[in-house]
Image (tube, coloured by chain):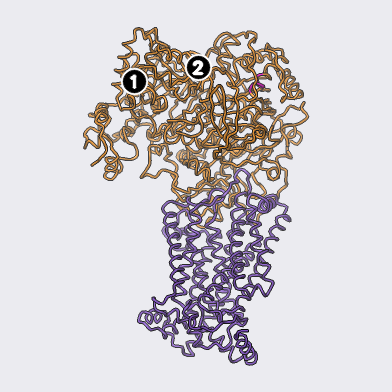
Amino acid sequence: MAVAAGKRKAPFKETNRVIRPGETYGGIDDAVLTPVLAPLAKTPMWWWIGFTISAAVLLVYLVSVVKLITTGIGIFGNNIPVAWGMPIINFVWWIGIGHAGTLISAALLLFRQPWRTTVNRFAEAMTIFAVVCAGLYPILHLGRPWVFYWLVPYPNTFGLWPQFRSPLDWDFFAIGTYFTISAVFWFIGLIPDLATLRDRSKTKVQQLLYGILALGWNGSAKAWQRYQRAYLLLAAVSFPLVLSVHSTIAMDFAAAQLPGWNNTIMPPYFVAGAVFAGFAMVLILAVPLRKAFGLEHLVTLRHLDNASKLMLATGMIVVYGYFIEIFTAWYSGVEFERYMIWNRMFGDHAVFFWALIFCNFVAIQPLWFRKVRQSPWALFFIAIIVSVGMWLERFVIFVVSLTKDFLISSWADYVSTVWDWSLFIGSLGLFSTLFFLFIRLLPSIATAETKETAYHDHHHGSDAFEHARMEYFHAEEPA
Amino acid sequence: MSDAQIDFTDIRAKLAKHEGPDYWRSIDQLAETEEFKLFLQREFPRQAAPLEGSFERRDFLKLLGASMALAGLSACARPPLAHEKIVPYVKQPEQITPGRPLYFATAVTYAGYAEGVLAESHQGRPTKLEGNPDHPASLGATGAITQAQVLTLYDPDRAQEVLQKGQPSTWDDFTSALSGTLAGLPGGDGFALLTENVTSPTLASQISDFLGQHPRARWFQYDPVHPDNVVAGARLAFGQDVTAVYDFRAADVVVALDSDFLDAGPGSLAHSRAFADARRLRRATDTMNRLYAFETAPTHSASLADHRVALKPSDVSALAAALAAAIGASAPTAQRPAAVSQALFDALVADLEASRGRSLVVVGPDQPPVVHAIGHALNAALGNVGATVSYVRPAAARPAIHREELAELVGLMNDGSVKALVVLGANPVYTAPASLDFAGALAKVPFSAKLGLYHDETADAVTWSVPESHFLEAWGDARAFDGTATIRQPLILPFYAGKSEIELLGALLGNPSTAGYDVVRNYWRANVTGSFDDFWRESVYRGAVAGSSSPAVSVSAAPVAEALPAASNFELKLVLDDSLLDGRFANNGWLQELPKAFSNLTWDNAAVIAPTTAESLGVKTGDVVKLTSGGKDLSAPVWVQPGHAVGAISLALGYGRARAGKVGTGVGVNAYKLLDHTAAGAQAVTVAKTNDSHALVSTQTHHSLEGTGEARHIVRSGTLSEFRAAPDHPHFVHPVAHHEADLYPDFEYKGYRWGMVIDQTVCTGCNACVVACQSENNIPIVGKAEVARGREMHWIRVDNYYSGSLDDPQFFHQPMPCQQCEKAPCEPVCPVGATVHDSEGLNVMVYNRCVGTRYCSNNCPYKVRRFNWLQYAELATDATALSLANNPDVTVRSRGVMEKCTYCTQRIATARIDASVEDRKIRDGEVVTACQAACPTQAIVFGDLNDPTSQVTAVKASPLNYWMLEELQTFPRTTYLAKVKNPNPALASAEGSH
């Protein structure tokens, strides 16, 4: 199906190692880079289909944005008391998804986890695209989006600064920083691969494009040394961001005095939730991608296993958060808090709460079993359930809390509109369009780092390597 | 230029009217085709917007001249256009300071009865009505409807030209047709004049002149708002026409029999003030009156009741009779209704006996005449006559029972003896009881004319429809409930060349070019002794003619012999709507969107039933039922109302208009289709469930205060005896102890520190504050669909709560403006600093800084912030005349910004400027917020908390004062006085506590 897969006719057996034994540098390059450099005509049909659908959905997004700006925020279902509705849910949902990328690339790099190499590239891309989708939401969601820059502290004729006490302002900086650092980190990581692409380019356009992007990379030891240093430093800068971005967003809620928002547990709970959702998204993308590109030898079961372990761990932290919320509400003795939890669990929107408990708690329990963690499609479906669950979690926290706050007279329901959904579905289109462009134009696996892994596998694996190799080839024969 | 047909008759008519421009540019221009308007808009945008037609800048200027000279208002007469010149001020008019409004006294009327108002005029443009403190029916307050009347003035749907059978015509054509018709009727034989209730002395004298000239002409009155049963009841009791005037201030015990004396009917504002004065409580030593209310549907008055029983209308009648028997007054025999317990009945009788001469029985206008007669007998037996009730000559020029007059008129129309009918103001095609088929009878009248503000249902059916001038556009006069006359002065020239009733009568008297000003002046000149000019200046200025109240009449009650109305299984009570009245305000968006008391229902009427009734019928709110009464049927959605009487249905009139205008047409169901002119009170009705449902939109979802509501301590209430038991720290005011703690020192206010108190003990939930705020602060309406989404814009809302059982709940109204928290949660969360604290403690909103994150609203525990989700306010580019009702002192907000109550910061600013010019501090009472000014019971007090002598400081010192949601430590500047009730101590179950 895929170009690379077409060449590799031999039956393939899944492996638990971070890389299939016996991978060569050339083999890695062939597998990853050939499809990128393939001429337009040789672009596989599945890409065209996927890209066309994505672009069509992106069009929905553009129409929604135009409608939103020309008509006003009233096209959504928001009201008083529910002044923040689906757009903010989707914003936080996207930001959460954007978390695994940085975590995989930065944290695992710092902790020297070699298994990250084959998944970090598209996880980072995922992060950036998700942050793009997320970052547009708070701007579009403003009553007057054209003056969003008033949140930026810049010298102006009003003689006014933003109000630095507002968590929304912190939020603005957090997202801006996160996007910038993630994008730079991603680009730096791409440079050696871009150079390889440049070197393997057959056409002028490719040579020019990748040549410019490669920033004159020459592969010298000095270049490598500086590259490694820069990459590590950026990793060290971006790792705290994983914690800070979502903590800051959690402040939007924790700093408010609304029951259901005003909780000190929010920041860590949001971070765990974000990593949880982020790994779910990694799995949603990785499982079909490795199949489509025939990259099972690079993105192995070991990767999936590790990702699902992380998903399970962070998921259980999130579940702990749910119980702590219930406990604190009871323990506080505050009527408003107690009622909020009661309303969440048994009120008009109770079905959302129980659905979320199913998605985020019950559905991840099979991950305790290795067998499940190593079945790609089972993981794919669990990850989808988790993504839905995390969306529900935000709905329950944001909207359900707002519908019934302090004064009974102001209680009101929230009903989303077709535009709420079109903007959300459209943002999925934006994400997937960017993603399709990415997998077609850039290497979706970091070849330079993967080669490093292959090198280590060769030279340090010795016995284990031989053993595994024998096992591998033995198993390849039909039973 | 256009494919559209050009109507040459129309053009000729317009030219004849001299209404078009002097030099017309094209036929399209004259025809006012859409194309021409577009062309005009493109080329001369200022000329096209916003007023098409006759209202132009020079009218303002003329008006400035007019308002300058109160007595010599000749400038109101329109000079011929050819000689008009636009001239700037050569000398600044003496009274005009640009930017400062002027106030002119005039009056609004309901059923003909005047309520004095002061109309605020900005450079000749009326923008708001305030109560006239010198007028006995206002005392400075206004009702909700009065506040909304200024919007009707600018309603672009108003009738704008004379129509003959739907075709444009002219006043001249009309008057010549009219005099021609009149000439063909010897002695006026076959001529009928139909007016609403006439209290205007000038109009009455014109009518009597007319009837003198045409002795065989007939004059009928029909006004659905008119209290027919009150008139009939007085006739029954005393054999003559008298009006009872009540003194609630002197009454310790009040019994209301299906009466909303605080909110409906002539004199309700005066009643509100007096009743509230006798009830207001600051200290435990203050005295308090006691109110017993027996009624069908919850009313504003009964929300203050100390004892209330829901009874169907026939049971209220029976109770009146039983009470009369127990007191020893003349009445038909009747059983005490079972719903009124023996204990309550005995306690009530004992209470009345003990308060002889200090009690008062009031009967509502929906009770049949016999019950009114019983009420008079009760007051006489209790020694109240001369103490709390006095009888005066009626204010109406000719008291009448309108439903009987209309029936007689329809009879004459049907047998062909009416050859010409002139209708003044009324809209009988819509408002006549269905049992009369007025429209069918009207078709048999060869010449019919109607003068009205709108081309409405009646205008469609008559041969001539003449636009009426709004009361702010015309000279006139009217009497209040107690007979006090007001000379009504206009503030602006008629927008649409409308004519007043007086001017039309002038035409009937043979002078089509009569100016209302001359007629009114001539009438009063003839009736005044002494210097007329002094009288005129003083009366017009004050808005009340001194010494004009009706003389007292001595009466003696005849024994009541008439039988009580028969009870039926289901009784239908058709009531005037709280907002739309009889439907005449159906095209007023402020009133359509005004949430009704108790239900918070907007943009609809509904068949209101008790929960028990709903259960037995198997229906819920929004289900449509079919009501059948007197052979007519009507489908209406149900509203299940706690506290409504079982076995009865209340349905508001005024909805289901077929031709009200863009706002009001087709809203709700037309209850006139069930109205029976022979029924003096409730009608028997059968109810059948249908499978349909209708989306009723309420601004508040309803929850009982039990459970979490009670634990929230939102509404705090207790009884007078509880208060007296702990006069310094009543437990019900502070049910939970809270500790104040802050790391930071408080800000010190060196100048003013504004604050407000709302007294729940006297708040009737009348909504006057809501519309007053809307009018003052340019608050847009959003329409039914947006209200359904939860996006109504009212800056002050009246929250309704219940406690107790579904069948017999207690009612609480809680006006909720911005609480102006000292530690406002909205402020620190705004990322751009668009909502900040000012140096006088106000939590201010900077509209042009707001980017619309709405975080402030999420963090507001009171949810009093309102957001412009869409472009609700009219933009300059597409504004209609409605935008002229805007207050120029208040910004009109664009879409995407947050807004909220500002404590009328513009009024504070005005006072501050005045004070600084005179180099003094703002005096207590100098700043009156719009809600405070309107409040009929003076439940809202506003002022400077830094002033130890201010009224607000004194009220806040009351032990009843509490902060809403005090545990949140927001330190609101708006506080509430707990609601105190005064139940009869003889009754063990203290209803005032929970």
Against B100, is B213 above or below? above
Tell me the residue that label 1 is attached to.
B515
Tell me the residue that label 2 is attached to.
B402
The kind of secondary structure element at disc 2 is: helix
User: B195 or B847, which lies in front?
Assistant: B195
Q: What residue is rendered at 52% in x and 35% in y? A: B604
- Residue lying at the far front in this picture: please name it: A479
Which tint is chain A?
A: purple
A181 in magenta: no
Q: Foreground mark, 2 or 1?
A: 2
Q: Which residues are magenta?
A: B313-317
Give amino acid for label 2: His
Q: Is residue B930 visible?
A: no
Which tint is chain B?
A: orange
Quarter occupied by the N terminus of chain B: top left
User: B283 or B564, which lies in front?
Assistant: B564
User: A165 or B764, which lies in front?
Assistant: B764
Give amino acid for label 1: Ala
Chain containing the residue with disc 2: B
Q: Main secondary structure of the magenta part?
A: helix
Q: Is residue B455 left or right of residue A367?
A: left
Q: Earlier in the sequence, mark 2 or mark 1?
A: 2
Residue B484 place in picture, x, y as percent: 50, 18
